[in-house]
Amino acid sequence: MSDVAKDLRTRLNALRKRVESAALGCNRATDEITLIAISKTHPTETLRAAIDLGIADLGENRVQEADAKITELGRKAARWHLVGHLQENKARRAVGLFDIIHSLDSISLAQRLERLCVSEGRDELPVLVQINLGGEERKTGTDPTELKPLLDAVAECRRLRLIGLMTLPPYSENAEDGRPFFKTLRELRDQLQSEGRFGGVSGELSMGMSHDFEVAIEEGATMIRVGTAIFGERS
Ligand SMILES: *Cc1c(COP(=O)(O)O)cnc(C)c1O
């Protein structure tokens, strides 16, 4: 085993223990929490080592970078998640590359993805709507006040399947600062779920990163997006 793989195994084992104890601490089953390993900036060999260690879900934030890695490793090597903002001119490639898109944030992007699914022959594209709960101007994600029209538009798109909500709170060193955002996202999910917005199944909550996933799990996260705690610091 290479040094990269050994380091990865050590960090991954430690992370899995933390996920388990966070879940246990709030009476949740570990298997209802999907770990998405966020591999942006890391080379393809590192992703391959992660897959060998049992990672089934990999997340990238840029289409172009993901394209090279997914092409090399194979479309079926993992479940591929797009977690970064999707520019409309990259949408066609994204439809071909990713299993799940976490960053749907506008009506025009939804409509474009729908048209591209038709032209690319893709029957179903699972999406999460990204909500900007921090009100930060530079952040991507839809404003909560624009959520309903966006959801109505997504419902009109027959090939898009809304599976949940995603958020990225304003960065803070203190993990507890994320809690109110995670709680708000969960409440929104519960409300939309009761309206049947997720097709009668429960909606996913994509929230929590290396520094705050434990808090996110306590608040109901079903998909955590963890980069640094698995792969080490990004250069
Ligand atoms: C980079 C990234 C993550 C992972 O961040 P870490 O702090 O390295 O765990 C999660 N979500 C998104 C959207 C990201 O861009």
Image (tube, helix red, strand yellow):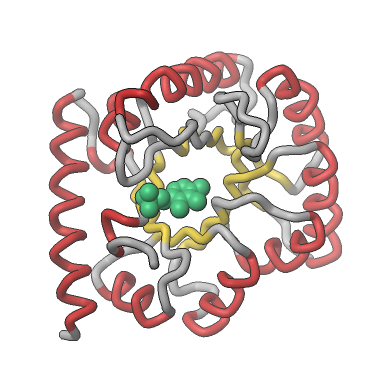
Query: Where does the C terminus fall, quadrant-wise?
Result: bottom left
Determine the image quadrant of residue 103: top right
Quarter of the image where one finds residue 82: bottom right
Query: Residue drawn at (51%, 79%), measured in percent from left and top?
Result: 74
Residue 157 in the figure: left or right of residue 50: right
Quadrant into which the N terminus falls: bottom left
Position of 61 compared to 148: left or right? Answer: left
Relative height, residue 71 to residue 176 (above, below): below
Q: Is residue 176 left or right of residue 86?
A: left
Q: Is residue 56 above or below residue 31?
A: below
- The answer to which image quadrant residue 123 occupies is bottom right
> Horizontal and vertical percent for residue 3?
17, 81
Q: Nearer the viewer, residue 230 or 176?
A: 176
Look at the picture and state if 135 lies above or below 31: above
Query: What residue appears at the point 18 percent right and 60 percent down from the top-left corner?
Result: 11
What residue is rendered at 66% in x and 42% in y? Answer: 161
Residue 213 is left or right of residue 168, and the answer is left
Q: Position of residue 69 (x, y in %)?
A: 52, 77
**Between 200 and 170, which is closer to the camera in this rendering?**
170
> Measured along the vertical axis of the image, is residue 229 above or below residue 178?
below
Q: Position of residue 181 (x, y in %)?
A: 46, 22
Residue 68: x %, y % from top left: 57, 79
